[in-house]
Image (tube, grey):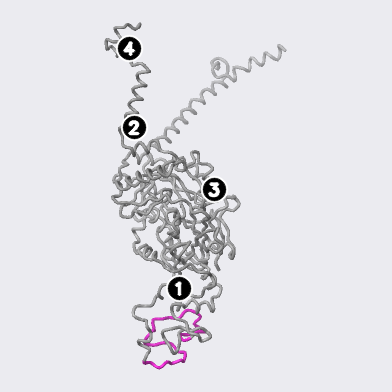
Amino acid sequence: MSETRVPGETDAPHDDAQSGGDDAEFSLAQSNALIPLLVISAVTVLAIVLVIVRAKPVVPHEGAVANKAFGPADFPELFAQQEALLGAAGPSTGSSALVFPVPAPPFSEGIFPCTSCHEGIPPNPERRPLEGMHSDIVLHHDEEHRWCLDCHDTNNRDQLHLASGAPVPFTESYRLCGQCHGTQYRDWRSGIHGKRTGYWNASKRYFLCVHCHNPHNPRFAALQPLPPPIRPQYLRSEDVAVAPSGEAGPAATGKEGGDGAHAR
Amino acid sequence: MARTPADDCGGSTADAGVSRRDFLTAVGVAAAGFLAGCSPDVREAFFQKHFLELSPQEVDRRIARLRADYKQRFGQDVSISAEPAVPGVVFGYALDLSRCIGCRRCVYACVKENNQSRDPQIQWIRVLEMEKDKGIDFEEANPYYDPERVPDPDHFYVPVACQQCRTPQCTRVCPVGATWQEPDGIVVIDYDWCIGCRYCMAACPYGARHFNWGEPQLPAAELNPNMHVLGNRPRPRGVVEKCTFCIQRTRVGRYPACVEICPVGARKFGNLLDPESEISRILREKRVFVLKAELKTEPKFYYFYGV
């Protein structure tokens, strides 16, 4: 037992840096290495703290993508019509009803009634490209197989006709569209296809197919998207820009500055 | 230092110090005096209760206080409703991904309707652009797309707002019960009770909750005066907010603002309990899915392909 204790006692100073004075270079080196390590870590921490404290908010350059907080006021034309649609009238309908209350068809200015021009013109049922009048209409709707008088009635220009020849007023043009687009017609009747406004539990405003789709070119035209949201790294700069006008003042800005960038 | 009778009546209080009893009494009297002297509105705000514990009269008082506050801040009269849930109604929402073109009209209609802060910007709807090649992949989704024209032929668009979960995790983690699910399924927040800890934001898997980091900036001219106390009334700084299915509109039968603005009719809304409603028909006739179904949040916001 005593033999094993002796090396144990001689080992102990090696581990303990305090008593390294007269014993060995090993423990001296250990205590020397500790001081530079402490200094380095302290300097690093100080540097990090300084960087955090003194950091300037990222101010995006002029015209940077998505650094402006756009609001609805920037696009008044888009939201002006919203209120006008609220006076929607009309009963909530069962799916089997064939007549739906819809707003008037979106005719071009002064084009209806068609008979005001066509009254005296003898109908020409021959398929041909139109010259003169209506040349602005470019048919892009199964144009290989169809032309004007497949939908517009030959003898009464103020209405349309089905494939059977039965006349359809412009206000019920969904019946005409539904001949080919049966699934869309069924979905539209039950409210799955197309837009509804008004009341979810009462009167809803239905829209004709032609309110959204140009009947001569029914595919939706591409739209310009509204601006994207502000990227999180620019949110903070927006706070700073707001502070002088707001009553929150610089104190609030400083408080938000720290983690405002992680807002979203 | 022994106390002498002379000390007690001789006014040498600096020497003896104020006794603890005197100090506490003075503080108590001062606090009581302050609360008694201040206006009833301040008193009400100080002793306010949780919204669900308010009596109808207390709800009216709170609304009156809020109206006076907004009148002062925005210079106009507003109407604040506390319309309760309609019995027999659970709201559901469906969005036709085959129609959505990613135009972001809904985002800004929502901001306008719900009085979100313009600056710092808060938007409740986030439209994610995803690649058709990859399908629904949140890692690759891009909310900052900004091309000249949408839709881009190689991409599709997934607008994401609050999914109004049937088992919402956000309400479970709230330490003060400031957010809860109403009987009609709308998850709402009591802005007066929220302490701004943002646990709910961490719990929400859809990023649907937003925090008012700064004092919300809302121009008086753009204020929507038609408000609900749990919905679109202007929020203070330091609280969380989220989509409420336009509670101020839908509780009185109207469609949400995003439904009415959508130029392609991709957004559908209705009563899940009514078998004839649009939303019920969609659930019956279309194949619908929900986002992150594996999390068992059971959203009432469905996505489908209408064609």
- In this rendering, position of residue A217 left or right of residue B3: right
Nearer to us of marks 2 and 3 is: 2
Give the amino acid type for the residue marked by disc 1 in the picture.
Leu
Circle nearer the N terminus (4, 3): 4
- Labelled disc at residue B16: 4
Give the amino acid type for the residue marked by disc 4 in the picture.
Ala
Residue A122's quadrant in the figure?
bottom left
User: Residue A210's spot in the image, x, y percent?
Assistant: 44, 74
* A249 relative to A12, above or below: below
User: Residue B153's spot in the image, x, y percent?
Assistant: 50, 67
Identify which residue, B238 or B233, lies in the foreground: B233
What secondary structure is the magenta-colored segment mainly? loop
Chain letter of the residue carrying label 1: A
Nearer to us of marks 2 and 1 is: 2
Question: Whole-Å distance between the Cαs marked 4 and 3?
Answer: 60 Å
- Labelled disc at residue B35: 2
Give the amino acid type for the residue marked by disc 3 in the picture.
Pro
**What residue range appears in magenta?**
A120-149
Residue B121 in view, yes or no: no
Question: Whole-Å distance between the Cαs marked 2 and 1?
Answer: 62 Å
The reply to whether the magenta stretch includes residue A122 is yes
Circle nearer the N terminus (2, 4): 4
User: Residue B169's spot in the image, x, y percent?
Assistant: 54, 46
Q: Where does label 1 land, which residue?
A: A208
Residue B221's quadrant in the figure?
bottom left
Q: Where does label 3 land, which residue?
A: B168
Circle nearer the N terminus (2, 3): 2
